[in-house]
Amino acid sequence: MPSAADAQGGMRGGGGHRGGGQRGEGPRGAAQPIPMPPAPTTGAAVVVSDPNAKKILTLRVEGSQRIEPETVLSYTRLRVGIAYNNELLDQAIKDLLASDLFADVSISGVESGNIVLRVRENPIINRVILEGNKRLKEDKITKEIKLKPRQIFTRTAVRQDVARIVELYRRQGRFAAAIEPKMVTLDQNRVDIIFEINEGPKSKVRQINILGNEVFSDKALRGQMATKEARLTTLLSSNTSYDQDRLAYDQQKMRQFYLTNGYADFRVTSAVAELTPDKKDFIITYVVEEGKRYKFGDVTVDSDIRDFDGKKVAAGLSIKKGDWYDAKKVEDTVDSLNQSAGLVGYAFADTNPEFNRDKDTLTMGINFHIAEAKRSYVEQINVTGNTQTQDKVIRREIRLAEGDAFNSFQVKRSQDRINSLGYFQDKFEIKQSQGSAPDRVVLDANVEEKSTGELSLSVGYSSLENFIIQASITQRNFRGKGQELRASVNYSSYSKSVNLGFTEPYLFNKNIAIGGDLFRRDYNAFNFSGSDRQTTYTQVSTGFQIRAGVPLTEYWSLAGRYGLTYDQVGLNGQYFNSDGSCNVLAAGSYLCQAIGNRWTSSVGYSLIFDSLNSRLRPTAGQKFSLSQDFAGLGGDVRYVRTRVDATKYKNLGAGFIGSLHVEGGYIFSLEGKKPAGVDKIRITDRFYLGEPDFPGFDIRGVGPRVTRTPYTTDATGKQILVTDKNSIVDDALGGNKYYVGRLEVQIPLGSGARELGLRPSIYVQAGALWGVTKPVATASFPTTIDPVTGRATVQPQVTPVLDSTSGKPLFAVPATDGANAGLQTICAVGYSASATTPCVGSSVNTAVTSTTAPFLEQFLGNSGAPRISVGAGVNWNSPFGPLRIDIAYALKKVKGDDTKLVTFNVGTQF
C-alpha cells in the first residue's frame, strides 16, 4: 500500500511556526518563495464492493485548529462501518486538498481499521504586500487580486493573483513584467504574502510588416492603423505599445481603406504579433490579399414607401455608374436615404443595400431597397439626467412637440441647439425608440450636466500686455434657468477693466433675450522710445449697454442695443507745454487732436444668421452677421459704424475641420467739416488690426501710422537715420475701413495628443486697414549745407517758450543784472514781473527757447492693399493653464507695418 505522503499528491507549505508575538504583524520569518505546482483535482468517490475488504472501526481527525472535525470529515466519503481500500483513502486525501483548507493531509491506522486523518490547516493571511510597483498604483492592483487579509491562504489563489497582476501589466504594454510571490510565516499560523514585482520596460511595436500588398505601399497602409511603430516622431503617442484589441481594429481599418478604394474582395489572411526574446518589442506581420478593383455598376432604388419615387431618388444619389466602388459611399447613401425618409415622417425607415457582384466585368451593381414603413408621430419627449437645469430650458431648444409628425432634421437641429448651450457633456444625442404603436416615436433627451459656474483667479504672461492678473466669476446657467451672470476684473501694465453683466435668454418665458453690461475700462496706448515702452495716450471709458434679441426664423435673429459711454482721453505729462497746451512737436498733431472728454450715445442692431452645429466648437454650418451702430442720439460724437462678419465650417473628413472667415467694417462720420489734416473720426473710435486677430503682425501692427525716426551720426561724421526699431516712435492711428479673410484647417491628432489637450491648426490670412486723413506735419527742421564738404545736415528746431498767461515769448534776464539776474520776463529789454506792468530797466535779455532734436516724420500704411500671412498655431490645455502659441510669417506687407513671428499667451488658474 502506498504511503500517505504518496497518496495525497498535494502541496506542502514552507516555513515553520514561531512562538510569542501579538496578534497583528508579529515577528516575521525570512520571506520564502511560494512554489506554484499544478492545481489539485478532485476525483469521483470510490465505492468499495469487495466483501472481504476491511471496515473502518474508528475514525478520528487530528491537527485541526479552526475547523471542526465533523467539517473535515464532511469533505470525505469516509464513515465508521464502511469498507475501505487504498483507492478510497487516496480519494479522501484528494478531496481534502481540493477544499483549499489544508496545506497537508496524511492518513494512519490503515492496517488496523482505526483511521486517523492528520491535517495541517492552511494559514490565515495577515497582510498582502506589493513591492516594486511604480507604473501601476497599489489601489489598481489590490482591487483586482483576490487575496485579502484574514482570508485563508492557498497556493491556487496565489497563482491566480499572479496571473491577474501579469495581465494588468500586459494591458499597460509591459509584457516583460515578472511577479515572484513570497510568503513570510508568522505566529498563530499566519502569513504575510509579498508580491515582488519587476515591471520591466514597456513593450513597443518595433516593426509592422505587411505582405501581399502591391497596390498600396506599406507606409500608406500603416498610416491607416491606430498602432504606430516606435520612432522618435511618435514619442508623444500612446499607440506605440502593443494592444491585442487594437490589432483587430487595425485589420478593420485596412479593410475599410481597401473597400473605399474599390477592392471589394480584400481580406487579411493572417495577423501575427511576435514578442522579441527580450520581451521588449513586438513585431507585427499582416498577410493580405488585395483582389481585383471594382467599379459601380447599375445603381437603383427600390422603395416600398409610397412617398418615395425610386427613380427620382436614384437620380439624386452621389453614387454614379462607372465610379470606383467605395463602401463608405454606400454607407453614406444608406444613411442619407434613411434621413430623407425621416424628413417626411418615417422614423423607422430601413434601407438595405443589395449587391450584385460581377467578377467578369469587375462591377458592383447595387439596389437600395427601402422597406415599407409607417409615417411616425412623436408620442413622448422625455428629458432626464438634469438635476440643476430646469426642464423648460432643455425643452425650449427642442424643435418638435409631442404629437408632431416625426422629422429627423428637426431632431438633429434640436440636438445641436442643446449642445450649443454648453450646460451638458459633449456628444449629447437625442435617442429615438419605438412608442406604444408602430407609428409612434419616443424621443429621449438624457443629458449629463457639467459645471456651468466658473470662479477663477489667474495670473499669466502675454506678449501683448506682459504680466496679467484676472479675476472673474461666471454662472452660465444661473438658478438652472439658463441665465448668465458674470463679473470680472482685469489688470495689467497697460489696461485695467471692471465688467458686470447679466443675460436672460427667455424673458417671461417668451423667446426674447435681454441683457446688460456695466463697465469701466482704463486703456493705455503705448510706443517705444529706445528699449522702453512708454504710454502715449490714456483712455478711460465708463458706461453701460442694454440689449435685446428676438428670433425671426429658425436661423435668423435680430438684436438691438443701446449704449452710453463717457470717454476721458488724455496724454502723458511729457507731451504738454508749460502753459498746459499740447506740445505738438512732442506728441504729434494726431495725438493732440484726440485729447478731451466726450459722451457717446449710440443705438445699434445686428441681423444674424446662425446654422452652426455648435457655438462652442463648431465643425459644420455657417454664421453671418450685419451690424450697425449709430452714434449721435445725444452725446458729443456722431458716426455710423457698419460691420459684416461671415464664417463657414466644413468637415473635410478624417478629423480635419476647415473654416473660412471673412469680415469687414466701415465707420462714416456725421460730423461737420474739419480743419485740414484733422480726421472726422477720433482716434479712439477707429478700427485697429494686428495681434492677436492677425497673426504675423504685431499689436496694432497693420494700417495707418506715424513714425518718427531720429537722426544720428556715423563714424565718418555723416548724418544718418537710426535703424534700431526700438528707437523709432511708432504711433498706430487706426483706420476707418478694414477687411480680413482667414482660411484655416484644424489638424486631428492621435489619442495621446488629444489627451494632452492639443488642438493645432494651419492658416493663411489676408487683410488691410486704411482710410484716415493724413495728419499735418508736426515739425519742420532747418537744413544747412557745409560749404567745404557740401554735406547737408538737418538741424534741431528751436522754438520760443511762451508765457502761460499772456502767450507772449519769455526772455531771461542776464546774470549781470543785479536785481533781476536769471529771472524770466516777457520783456526783451528791462524787466516786468507780470504781463500787465511796464518793462523797467535797460538790460538786454535773451529769448528762452526749447530745442527739439531733428527727426524724420512719416505717414505710412494708409493703403487698402492686402497684407498676407501664413502660419500655424496650437491651443494647449497645459498644466499651467490654457496656452496659445502662433508662429506666423508675413508674406506681404506695406511699408510701415510691424511684423511679429511668434506670439503666445499663457495663464494659470488656481
Image (cartoon, grey):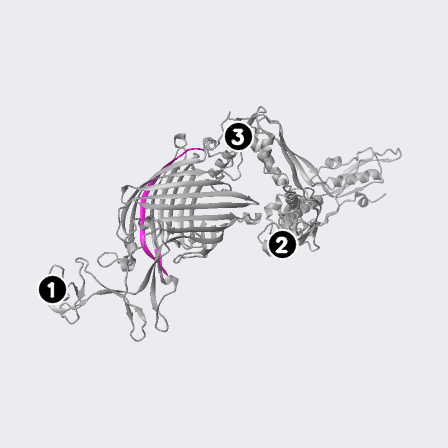
Q: Residue at x 51, y 39 (%)?
A: 425
Rendering coords of residue 272 (x, y %): 71, 48
**Front-most of residues 392 and 82:** 392
3 vs 1, front mark: 3
Does dot 2 land on a helix, a strand or a loop?
loop
Q: Position of residue 337 (x, y in %)?
A: 58, 33
Q: Residues within 10 Å of mark 1 (few under 14, many from 20)?
A: some
Q: Please tell me whether residue 531 belongs to the stretch shown in magenta.
A: yes
Near-viewer residue (405 or 751): 405
Residue position for label 1 = 839
Query: Do residues under tags 2 and 1 come within 8 Å of each other at their CB atoms?
Result: no
Q: Amino acid at mark 2?
A: Ala
* Residue labelled with disc 2: 230
Image position of 569 with respect to 529: above or below: above
Q: Is residue 837 left or right of residue 737?
A: left
Find the magenta span and give its range. Answer: 526-553
Query: Majority secondary structure of the magenta segment?
Result: strand
Residue that carries the numbered disc 3 in the rendered image:
407
Nearer-N-terminus badge (3/2): 2
Specify the label residue 215 is tagged with.
none
Amino acid type, callout 3:
Asn
Q: Is residue 270 left or right of residue 753?
A: right
Q: Mark 1: which amino acid?
A: Cys
